[in-house]
Amino acid sequence: MKFILGSGSPRRLELLAQIGVVPDEIRPPDIDETPHRAELPRPYCARISREKAAAVEATQGDIVLCADTTVAVGRRILGKPADRDEAASFLRLMSGRRHKVITAVAVKRGTRVWERDVMSTVRMKSLADDELNAYLDSGDWQGKAGGYGIQGAASALIPWISGSFTGIVGLPLAETANLLRAAGYPLYGERP
């Protein structure tokens, strides 16, 4: 049995290490992550994590873990910004407001898939132009859903959350541990 992480995210790798899980292989799938017309954020996020898991090649006994993190303001899905201008647009939209961060996890073993999504609420402070520009200059927004990562420089912009901190970072650990155990992955020193 191999454990395959279907993600190139260094944050997910670090989070898994916190619960003693080290992948045997890392195989990020290449799928189209474009939302369907009128698709809502939570079903979109769950669909993408399932599609990622389905796209990772594995043998019958291998365990594959994939996840997707989506930032949503109302019904609007904020993906990874393409450039600085889009990141600025996302951050201005969230400035002084609450938004949702959804992380869906899919664990596959053979033909069986275990899934869970976790939704958290995040409030971003009202951003002054100098704060916004300093954050954009840091480059920390690159490659992150919604244009920020709560575990980095943007932590100074987030005064309040309700939900799973690790889910906001990109992998809700309590739920992920339960999915891995359900799929037969030994945790907490149970591995031979």
Image: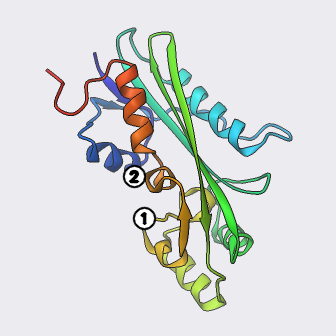
Q: Residues within 10 Å of mark 1 (few under 14, many from 20)?
A: few
Residue 118, given in percent of the width and then of the height, sits at: 56, 43
Q: Give the amino acid at mark 2.
A: Arg
Kindly give the residue lying farthest to the right in the view shown.
38
Sooner in the amino-acid sequence: mark 1 or mark 2: 2
- Which corner quadrant of the image does residue 59 belong to? top left
The reply, left or right, for residue 18 in relation to residue 32 is left
Q: Position of residue 32 (x, y in %)?
A: 66, 35
Please report the residue visible at 71 percent of the width from the left and 75 percent of the height from the top: 92
Identify the image quadrant of the C terminus: top left
Q: Viewed as shown, does residue 169 lie left or right of 180? A: right
Mark carried by residue 11: 2
Q: Residue at the front extreme?
A: 162
Residue 151 marker: 1
User: Horizontal and vertical percent for residue 106?
Assistant: 51, 29
Q: Is residue 173 left or right of residue 150?
A: left
Q: Residue 190 — which label?
A: none
Name the amino acid, label 1: Gln
Q: Residue furthest left?
A: 192
Dot 1: element: loop
**Image position of 67 with respect to 76: above or below:** above
Q: Quadrant of the N terminus?
A: top left
- Which residue is pictured at 39% across the width and 52% down the height? 11
Question: For numbered disc 2, what is the local secondary structure?
Answer: helix
Residue 134 sits in quarter: bottom right
Q: Residue at x 60, y 91 (%)?
A: 130
Q: Quadrant of residue 122?
A: bottom right
* Circles 1 and 2: CB atoms closer than 8 Å: yes
Query: Residue 64: x, y in percent?
Result: 41, 25
66 vs 99, left or right, is left
Nearer to me, 146 or 103: 103
